[in-house]
Amino acid sequence: MKVVEKFVSINGEGTHAGELAVFVRFRGCNLNCSYCDTMWANEPGCPYAEESPEQIVSYIEETKVKNVTLTGGEPLLQKEMPELLRLLSEKKELRVEIETNGAVDLSGFRNGGGCVFTMDYKLPSSGCENGMRTENFSILEKKDTVKFVVGSRVDLERADQIIQEYGLIDRCHVYFSPVFGKIEPEQIVNYMVEHRLNGVRIQIQIHKVIWDPNRRGV
Ligand SMILES: C[S@@+](CC[C@H](N)C(=O)[O-])C[C@H]1O[C@@H](n2cnc3c(N)ncnc32)[C@H](O)[C@@H]1O
Ligand SMILES: Nc1nc2[nH]cc(C(=O)O)c2c(=O)[nH]1
Ligand code: SF4
Ligand SMILES: [Mg+2]
């Protein structure tokens, strides 16, 4: 598997934000979002370590950290991901979360049921909305999340429409997160208030507040 970084930090995003997590970031992506904060990991020349699923599991166990975040790039493009997920599901003490971009079919990755998906729905300002596979919504469960990374008023309106159309509030967690530095979080909150978006949560990436937003490995 093509690993570009591994580290222990606090999770800056999602339902376990603020808790310790061990991160494994994989190389390469099938989208090219305008705002991507890890574009470096998607460049063909980005250095990586070739690691087997067994090696990755050993590293995770050595850290003694129980929350595991698999991210990228797009982690679900790795050929050996099903094997990695199978091995991780045997470690009952771990909580495994996958950050995925909404453009990969999730149906083959739920086997064993252990992992939690945080799936983005890419909005118009990302430039990648046409890659979204809305059939993935039917696979999501209460423990999973749909995340909308919002960069504009048009994005807010589109997110609102998708939430209603697919009944997302009753299906799973729903988060709004500002494209970091691009939109005032207050604008997002104002929209939530105006439109009475019960059940939606706003979240700001905590690691970008604690550290330099461009810093890697945190
Ligand atoms: C770098 S992506 C990797 C996982 C997967 N490719 C995806 O897009 O979900 C991890 C998360 O960071 C979010 N993200 C990337 N750039 C961002 C930015 N500039 N501001 C806020 N969130 C961002 C993505 O939308 C995604 O939810
Ligand atoms: N601290 C920290 N938390 C994160 N949660 C999700 C991340 C990601 O890049 O997917 C991330 C990240 O890059 N850093
Ligand atoms: S899908 Fe994720 S990794 Fe790929 S370009 Fe978009 S934000 Fe970056
Ligand atoms: Mg990140």
Image (cartoon, grey):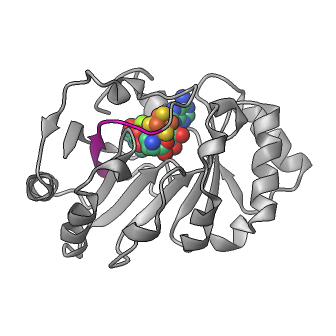
Identify which residue is drawn at 45% across, 39% down.
Answer: 30
Residue for point 43% across, 49% down: 18
Q: Residue placed farthest to the bottom in the image?
A: 112
Q: Residue at x 49, y 56 (%)?
A: 118
Q: Main secondary structure of the magenta part?
A: strand
- Magenta segment: does it hold 28? yes
Expressed as whole percent of the image width and height from the top left, the position of residue 19 reads: 38, 53
Residue 48 magenta-drawn?
no
Quadrant location of residue 191? top right
Count of numbered badges drawn on the protein? 0
The residue lying toward the viewer, choosing from 49 and 61, is 49
Image coordinates of residue 108 in percent, x first then y, are 40, 69
Quadrant of the rendering where the C terminus is positioned: top left
In the rendered image, residue 210, in percent from the top left (x then y), is placed at 43, 29
User: In this view, which residue lies farthest toward the right?
Assistant: 194
Residue 123 % position (x, y): 68, 40
User: Compared with residue 22, is residue 5 higher up or lower down, i.e. above or below?
Assistant: above
Task: Please report the residue visible at 59 percent of the width from the left and 45 percent of the height from the top.
Answer: 131
Judge by depth and name the residue closer to the eye, 42 or 178.
42
Q: Is residue 1 left or right of residue 141?
A: left
Q: Is residue 3 visible?
A: yes
Question: Can residue 20 be seen in the rendering of this structure?
Answer: no
Displayed quadrant of residue 58: bottom left
Q: Quadrant of residue 110?
A: bottom left
Boundaries of the magenta span? 21-30
* Residue 171 sits above or below residue 44 on the image: below
